[in-house]
Image (cartoon, grey):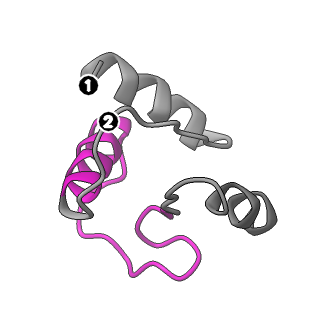
Amino acid sequence: VETVQRDVARETATLAYERAGIGGSEAGRATPTLEHLVAELHTLLARAGATPPYVLVGHSMGGAAIRLFAARYP
């Protein structure tokens, strides 16, 4: 994944996100429901100053979160 992101970053801005408790992210306080993950991602994108349109890429549970994100924030 890092290799793909590095390649894409040569052409445009990128942002990598690991949900709470995964990889290097600290543990979260809330139960990681899809609704919570989508709200958290929306907040993080706003705080990072990222503006739509977004190209979101996810794996496993992340795929479901991305589909819900797209439905909530078209």
The answer for how far apart the CA atoms under marks 1 and 2 are is 10 Å
Q: Which residue is mark 1?
A: 73
Q: Is residue 11 left or right of residue 69?
A: right
54 versus 6 height, above or below:
above
Q: Residues within 10 Å of mark 1 (few under 14, many from 20)?
A: few
Residue with the mark numbered 2: 52
Rendered position, 19 above or below 73: below
Residue 38 appears at what percent x and percent y?
32, 40
Dot 2: within a 10 Å radius of its alpha carbon, few (fewer than 14), some, or many (20 or more) residues? few
Residue at screen point 61% across, 42% down:
58
Which mark is in front, 1 or 2? Answer: 2
Q: Secondary structure at mark 1?
A: loop
- Residue 41, percent from left and from top: 32, 50
Indicate the amino acid at tag 2. Pro
Disc marking residue 30? none
**Residue 36 appears in which quarter of the rendering?**
top left
Q: Where residue 23 appears, x then y in whole percent? A: 59, 76
Q: Compared with residue 26, is residue 20 higher up or lower down, i.e. above or below?
A: above
Residue 31 part of the magenta-drawn span: yes
Say what amino acid the circle numbered 1 marks.
Tyr
Q: Name the quadrant of the N terminus.
A: bottom right
Q: Which residues are magenta?
A: 17-46
Q: Residue at x 32, y 36 (%)?
A: 52
Instruction: Say left or right for 35 vs 16.
Output: left
Q: Quadrant of the C terminus?
A: top left
Most distant residue in the right direction? 3
Does the residue at mark 1 contact the one at mark 2 (Cβ under 8 Å)? yes
Residue at horizontal 62 percent and vertical 61 percent from the top: 9
Q: Nearer the viewer, residue 43 or 61?
A: 43
Q: Which quadrant of the figure has residue 51?
A: top left
Q: Is residue 64 magenta?
A: no
